[in-house]
Image: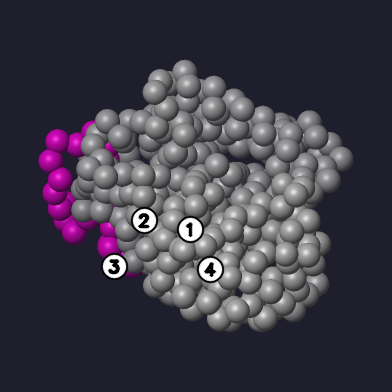
Amino acid sequence: MKRAQQNIIIKDLERKMVFLTGPRQVGKTSLALAISKGFEKSLYLNYDNISHRDIIHKADWLPDTKLLILDELHKMEGWKNFIKGVYDTKPAHQQILITGSARLEAFRQSGDSLAGRFFRHRLNPLSMAEIPGSTDKDLGSLLDRGGFPEPFLAESDDDANRWRLLYIDGLIRTDILDFEKIHDFRAIQLTLELLRLRVGSPVSWSSLARDVNCSPNTIKKYVGILEDLFIVFRVTPYNRNIARSLLKEPKIYFYDTGMVQGDEGIRLENLMAVSLLKHLNWIEDCEGKKSQLKTLRTKEKKEVDFAMIEDDEPKLIIEVKLSDTSVSPPLRYFHNKYGLKAAQVVKNIATERMDKGIQMRRASDFLKELTI
């Protein structure tokens, strides 16, 4: 399946380096290799491969290489200075694609800034908008299996479940421990399992800390690691005062909807979250508009699931429902009080319509219309 970013990445490579980031096994290597087929001479090097690592350290690739693909380069000490030197001295014909499953920007090693030398692209799981001719059956598969290519395309649910068991085990035993030395392995594993049960609910650091038997600051550190590895992402309340917004309890969602332990309504909310995040990442990476996914919440507990923010302004507020077709009172409140464009997205709805200025949308159709 051709990924939506392929053509724009090829175009961006003509001008700068491209950093392609995203969750483990989301399809970054497959996309990079698909891009390489359009080049007369390309080279793929993975820093996790010992023989590849030696070539990288010595910069021993042939000078006539047209596309150089470096995977997991952020694991190399001093990688920023290294790649800056490579980019600044490369032949004019050579293009460079850097891929990684941990956020490249999460690594704060000392070194010269790479500002102005690269474009960033974030590859997210498959969505209704990216699946050619997607149907309600695909929506069901995304809810049950998630949008990672291998389980989504698996021949059976059993194969998808087997993939996920190995995926979670690999995340915990390899990726997390490679990313940062954890003194209490059991605690971060328990944190991950508890988050799977609390998707869509405001997360209390103190409550999680009591359940895991550690400090709230340790919980925040663990969740930060899970974020940096593209396992989870947080959605915080929208507030023009960013400092105040960060003090409020976030909601946590998973990049892999298949990891969510909850009913169909919770899994639908998670799928909506990751699909909206993917859409906003596209707007930011490809169109250069600052974009964020937020929630709306007042002190009186009026809450709307999501707010799509572009250039610090809410473009659309969204409430997600499995079957309820009556407009959510908080959605109505925010729409009327602040004049915000609003939509209630429902999986099981007979007819789409407008209800006093609020869109009542079918989930499958709404998801298909998002830009990737």
Q: Earlier in the sequence, mark 3 or mark 2?
A: 2
Q: Earlier in the sequence, mark 2 or mark 1?
A: 2
**CA gap, disc 4 and disc 3:** 52 Å
**CA gap, disc 4 and disc 1:** 9 Å
Residue 339 disc label: 3
Q: Earlier in the sequence, mark 4 or mark 3?
A: 4
Q: Residue at x 71, y 52 (%)?
A: 52
Q: Which residue is mark 2?
A: 4
Asked whether residue 296 is drawn in magenta, I would say no
Disc 2 element: loop
Q: What kind of residue is marked 4?
A: Lys
Compared to residue 274, the image places residue 6 above or below, namely below
Q: Which residue is mark 1?
A: 36
Which range is magenta?
331-358
Asked whether residue 332 is drawn in magenta, I would say yes
**CA gap, disc 2 and disc 1:** 16 Å
Label 4: how many Cα within 10 Å (few below 14, some 14–19, many 20+): some
Q: Residue at x 64, y 49 (%)?
A: 229
Task: Give the farthest residue toward the right.
Answer: 183
Disc 4 element: loop
Disc 3 element: loop
Q: In the image shown, does 293 or 30 lie closer to the viewer?
A: 30
Q: Nearer the viewer, mark 2 or mark 1?
A: 1
